[in-house]
Amino acid sequence: MQKIEKTDAEWRSELTPEQYAVLRRQATEAPFTGSYALTKDAGTFKCAGCGAELFSSDTKFDSGSGWPSFTEPAIAEAVELREDRSHGMVRTEVACARCGGHLGHVFDDGPRDAGGLRYCINSCALDLEPDEA
Ligand code: FE
């Protein structure tokens, strides 16, 4: 995979302030504020930073958390997991493998019949490309 590397100034000029805060500064959008928290539209969720295909609507489920939640990435190699010890917690950060952008975190309280994982992702880190009708 071709990695995408840009300077901080480039990211800042290309992304919205909210996208920049999440993707490049590990911020978390407020729950139930993002455009994809509740959507059931079919399609592919791409990285808002680089366009990499990250998640499929087929694995999206209603976690009640207020963030889009998925049981697995569209392609395992599309995401990178990193230990995150910020805010006095130990969590597993989920990042885009292509551009390194912060997407959210993965937790082990997902649906047990679908692997038990919950990829909890910020809406503004994603762009939904709807399936052709
Ligand atoms: Fe990306």
Image (cartoon, helix red, strand yellow):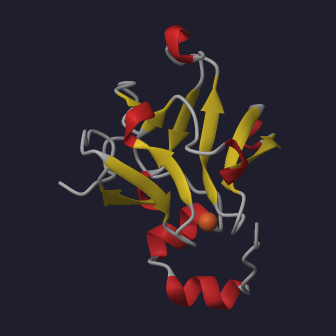
Q: Left or right: where does residue 15 sit relative to residue 77?
A: left
- Which residue is drawn at the image coordinates 45% and 52% (left, top)? 29
Q: How many marks?
A: 0
The picture places residue 26, in percent across and down from the top left corner, at: 64, 57
- Which residue is drawn at the image coordinates 69% and 69% (left, top)? 99
State ligand 1's quadrant.
bottom right
Q: Left or right: where does residue 83 sit relative to residue 111?
A: right
The picture places residue 70, in percent across and down from the top left corner, at: 48, 34
- Which residue is drawn at the image coordinates 57% and 64% (left, top)? 52
Q: Left or right: where does residue 44 sit relative to residue 73?
A: left
Which residue is nearer to you in this view: 33 or 93? Answer: 93
The picture places residue 17, in percent across and down from the top left corner, at: 47, 76
The N terminus - image quarter: bottom right
Locate residue 86: give its quadrant.
Answer: top right
Q: Residue furthest front?
A: 132
Q: Left or right: where does residue 108 sit relative to residue 81?
A: left
Note whether 73 is above or below 10 in the view shown.
above
Which residue is nearer to you in this view: 47 or 131? Answer: 131
Locate residue 64: give its quadrant.
Answer: top left
The picture places residue 128, in percent across and down from the top left corner, at: 36, 58
The C terminus - image quarter: bottom left
Q: Residue furthest top?
A: 113
Note whether 34 is above or below 2 in the view shown.
above
Which residue is nearer to you in this view: 54 or 87? Answer: 54
Note whether 109 is above or below 88 in the view shown.
above
- Which residue is drawn at the image coordinates 40% and 24% (left, top)? 63
